[in-house]
Amino acid sequence: MASSCRRPEHTAPPEVVSLTAFSRMIEIQTQMSERAVELLSLPEGQACFLLDVGCGSGLSGDYLTEEGHYWVGVDISSAMLDVALDREVEGDLLLGDMGQGMPFRPGTFDGCISISALQWLCNADKRSHSPPKRLYTFFSTLYSSLARGSRAVFQLYPENSEQLELITSQAMRAGFSGGMVVDYPNSTKAKKFFLCLFADGLKTLISSSLSLRRCRFNNMKGKSVKKGRDWIMEKKDRRRRQGKNVRPDTKYTGRQRRPHF
């Protein structure tokens, strides 16, 4: 994760830096897009509505179109979006700074991908820019715009471990769960970082059921909060939402066993 003195985000703001579409760059972009979509774990044979953050000239969008998905691309560079328009990409394009948030209705998208864009939010290109605040604004509004149970996958080039910690901490603070997937971890050149986030709705669930849990607690009359049937059923439901294997419910679920001597 060693930093380079020629990293693009150190040379100019993102709306200024543009990448020339060499054939090698297109190949790498397509490969990373393919991997990101794979990590989204979308339903097979079903067209989804996806968000491409930092879409640039629409190279990732081309792959989404080939896979039969519909998409909206957001980028801060008007020049790159002009290239996408000249290329006549299939997706809808929006000029915007992801550090100012995603302007979409709640639950709009079935998933989100982003290729080589997220690390730009860690730089303060203006005096008013605060990387932690911009990251939190982005992740919190993205969380809202994703359907519950969907995923967001970001391919990024973290400069160091501190930058990676900053990104992941703000994502978790916004309500996401998930972690980092590293492809080719033992290779210096081929190593790729993918931040996989889950909009599982647990944060909303916890806040909405807080009063219910307090009511149950008040009605326990000295009974332990844990290990009761209600507690066991909530725990099993939570693990099911996390995609884990859980035994089916029966009439014996949460039933207190007789003591054995």
Image (cartoon, rainbow, N blue to C red):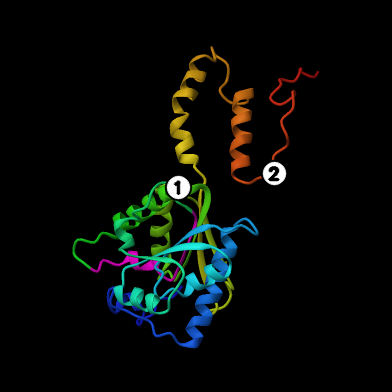
In primary-sequence order, the first of circles 2 and 1 is 1
Q: Furthest-top residue in view?
A: 221
Q: Position of residue 2 (x, y in %)?
A: 43, 75
Q: Is residue 156 visible?
A: yes
Q: Nearer the viewer, residue 109 or 9?
A: 109
Q: Is residue 97 above or below residue 247?
A: below
Q: Could you tell me residue 223's position as x and y percent?
A: 58, 16
Which label belongs to residue 107?
Answer: 1
Q: Secondary structure at mark 1?
A: loop
- At label 2, counting other C-alpha atoms closer than 10 Å, the crowd grade (few under 14, some 14-19, many 20 or more) is few
- Kind of residue indicated by mark 2: Asn
Q: Give the residue at x 42% y 69%.
A: 158
Q: Given the image, on which type of amino acid does mark 1 rest?
A: Gly
Query: Which residues make up the magenta segment?
Result: 110-125
- Residue sitting at 52 percent across and 45 percent down? 200
Residue 12, quarter of the rendered image:
bottom left
Residue 139: image tag? none
Residue pointed to by mark 2: 245
Residue 120 percent location from the top left of the image: 35, 68
Magenta stretch containing residue 82, yes or no?
no
